[in-house]
Image (spheres, rainbow, N blue to C red):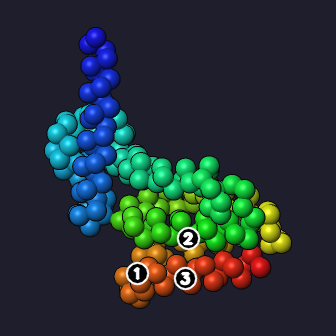
């Protein structure tokens, strides 16, 4: 019975930490401006619990990002077309890009932090490999040559630093960004 209670406490603590980190990251200017101590205090757990569970700040960022992105990843993996499997590449590629851009617009602070946490390269972050594979596979169903390179090129259009630049420095509304990306993707896939 004690073991079951410990597991329930651990699950509750994990959810409390993820919720606290997500809220602090969103309101504190991004994950880099929030200390692990602040997250632990907001979640009502000890700092040691935080480090044992997530390892370091990058582990916590990855966990929050993963929790936030579960719905969009599930839609891409098993949702209905055109976002999910079964759609022709011409329809699926723009749908995937739009879903990813919408997610990054809604989660700019988190997306930026995750891409910065990629050991000096956003392409070394685990989620990038997943998105690249999905995009490459969707492109193989089109006339686009070299689907692997084309997937990299299209995903570059939704990098968090570019999304942030367009939204902040150029003050481009998200709707307009999504429309322009859709037009560009349509030209690429024919």
Mark 2 lies on residue: 98
Q: Residue at x 30, y 40 (%)?
A: 15
Image quarter for residue 151? Answer: bottom right
Q: Is residue 49 left or right of residue 119?
A: left
Front: mark 1 or 3: 3
Q: Which mark is residue 149?
A: none
Mark 1 lies on residue: 167
Establish if 139 lies above or below 62.
below
Asked if residue 122 shows in the view, the reply is yes
Q: Is residue 41 left or right of residue 140?
A: left
Establish if 7 lies above or below 92.
above
Front: mark 2 or 1: 2
Q: Earlier in the sequence, mark 1 or mark 3?
A: 1
Q: Residue at x 31, y 17 (%)?
A: 4
- In this view, the residue farthest toward the bottom is 170
Q: Residue at x 32, y 32 (%)?
A: 11
Q: How many marks?
A: 3
- In this view, the residue farthest toward the front is 80
Give x and y (percent) for residue 61: 38, 52
Q: Residue at x 19, y 37 (%)?
A: 45
Mark 3 lies on residue: 179
- In depth, the one of 18 and 152 nearer the eye is 18
- In depth, the one of 34 and 108 nearer the eye is 108
Crowding near the residue tagged with mark 1, few <14, some 14–19, many ≥20 C-alpha atoms within 10 Å: some
Crowding near the residue tagged with mark 3, few <14, some 14–19, many ≥20 C-alpha atoms within 10 Å: few
Q: CA distance from mark 1 to mark 3?
A: 14 Å
Q: Earlier in the sequence, mark 3 or mark 2?
A: 2
């Amino acid at each position: 019975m004690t073991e079951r209670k410990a597991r329930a406490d651990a699950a509750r603590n994990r959810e409390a930490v993820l919720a606290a980190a997500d809220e602090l990251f969103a309101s504190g200017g991004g994950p880099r401006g929030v200390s692990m101590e602040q997250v632990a205090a907001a979640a009502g757990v000890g700092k040691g619990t935080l480090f044992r569970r997530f390892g370091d700040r990058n582990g916590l960022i990855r966990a929050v990002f993963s929790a936030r992105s579960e719905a969009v990843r599930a839609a891409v993996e098993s949702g209905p077309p055109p976002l999910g499997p079964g759609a022709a590449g011409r329809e699926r590629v723009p749908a995937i890009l739009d879903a990813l851009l919408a997610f990054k617009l809604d989660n700019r602070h988190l997306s930026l932090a995750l891409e910065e946490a990629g050991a000096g390269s956003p392409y070394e972050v685990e989620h990038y490999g997943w998105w690249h594979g999905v995009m490459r596979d969707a492109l193989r169903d089109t006339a686009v040559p070299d689907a692997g390179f084309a997937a990299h090129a299209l995903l570059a259009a939704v990098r968090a630093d570019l999304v942030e630049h367009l939204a902040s420095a150029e003050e481009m509304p998200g709707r307009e960004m999504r429309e322009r990306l859709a037009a560009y993707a349509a030209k690429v896939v024919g």
